[in-house]
Image (cartoon, rainbow, N blue to C red):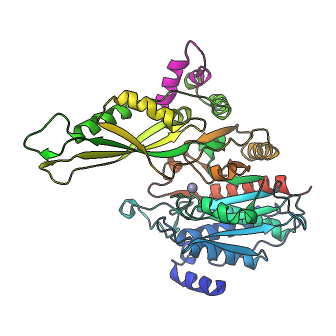
Amino acid sequence: MLLQAGVIFFTAVVPLAAQGIPPNPTPAHANPSPLADTEALSREALVWLAQLIQINTTNPPGNEQAAAKYIAGILEKEGITPEILEVAPGRSAVVARLRSSAISNPSRALLLVAHMDVVGVERARWTVDPFGALMKDGYIYGRGALDDKSMLAANLAAIIALKRSSARLNRDVIFLATDDEEAGGDASIRPLIAKNWDKFAAGYALNEGGEVISKGGKVQYVAVQASEKVSVNVAVIAKGPSGHAAIPTKDNAVVHLAAAVAKIGAYSAPVHFNTVVRRYFEGLAAVSDDEIAKWMHSLETTDRGEHAQRVISDANPQWASMMRDSIAPTLLSAGVRANVIPGEARAMLNIRLLPGDTIDVLLGALSKLVNDPHVRFEVQPNAGLAAPTSSLESDFYAVITKVVSQEFGGAPVLPYQSPWATDSSQLRLHNVQAYGLWPFPVTDEDLARMHGDDERLSVASFNKGVETLLHIVSDFAVTK
Ligand SMILES: [Zn+2]
């Protein structure tokens, strides 16, 4: 079955050999240490990345099963037994385990997570085929080159290196490729955990979500995600009498909605700091220019705090979002005819709450602000759940910090609360100390292409990331 899928796959894709990527990588030789030949391993992993990009897993619909079969085929060839877990029709996850002993101890196990699905593309805005895995100027281009197929290939490389070297493990290492991460819907990690938790239960996890930020060819800092904001969609609904557009009245629902959205758009929720955000800004101040650093240090001072929060928020919209609940109006709908005043107008707000905050408190503030009996708020189903922050004192966090600092020339390592959501919140809700780190050095410019056009990753960064991830995993899971 798997072999057959492989054959179909190889004939269906753009030939990689034409771009200098061998379609069948030569495996790195079996070595006594998993770290003995990371260069050869990275070359192999680059082929896996290219081939994963060529499997279109745009979500929706996802169709992750094709990627799952491809990954399972690679693992089987290495003598690692994969299990494909069907989450929904055509949508699967893959799990595989290297055992440290006959009896598993889930609380010690390390889970390597990456998702197989990607967000859609606006094809006309790309200068290359988004699913071609084209190599150009030292970069590999394609949807998923950053998010998250690079991590998927690196995780695969890590578990394969451990297997080939017959490393003596002090804990189980589990590989997990998830589906439906980008939509977080009915095939996401939530139902996967509900049905199959025993197959990948772990005490620690490494996932996407944090970054190695590079500037002028040098790593400036590394942000390790330990916490994330919580996504909640809220409909704003204005009602009024419908009627003939030739005779306007003051209670037109469109006008009331527009006024409400304008007020909400200008609103800035109060700032709250937790340990992660506090330590993030402290660390970042050390590598920022003097002027910004001064304000970062002043964020919680009584006399200059408020001003500092404004300066920092204005300097970078991501910083603004890290400190407070954020609200982005994203959808608008009203009306059926140009000459009919509609009885209802709706907007959608995508809200990202700080982990400790509740939607009721925020909506209380927004109701007061809007102050309009024609307008009401309706919380939509499938809101994210706030998860506890992963510990900044755990053994695993210490290993990540140590290795990453070594790998990137002593760059500061900061804990990070991401404005976006990842699969890690579901893991944290199951007592996993989950940390987010794309181990590949990227510039802000490349990072902006994530979910955007011409997504790409430099091959040098990819190689460095594979090596870094393998160092982290070896340091934490291999008996010395
Ligand atoms: Zn992602």
Q: Quick check: can you spot residue 22? A: no
Q: Which residues are magenta?
A: 293-318
Q: Nearer the viewer, residue 228 or 242?
A: 242
Q: Nearer the viewer, residue 13 or 337?
A: 337
> Which corner quadrant of the image does residue 68 belong to?
bottom right
Q: Quick check: can you spot residue 477? A: yes
Say if 75 sits above or below 257 in the image. Answer: below
Q: Quadrant of the C terminus?
A: bottom right
Q: Residue furthest top?
A: 303
On whether residue 320 falls in the magenta region, the answer is no
Say if 142 sits above or below 378 in the image. Answer: below
Percent from the top left, x then y, of residue 326? 48, 37
Q: Residue furthest right?
A: 480
On whether residue 310 falls in the magenta region, the answer is yes
Percent from the top left, x then y, of residue 432? 73, 50
Q: Quadrant of the N terminus?
A: bottom right
> Which corner quadrant of the image does residue 24 belong to?
bottom right
Q: In percent of the image, x 58 and y 70: which residue is there? A: 52
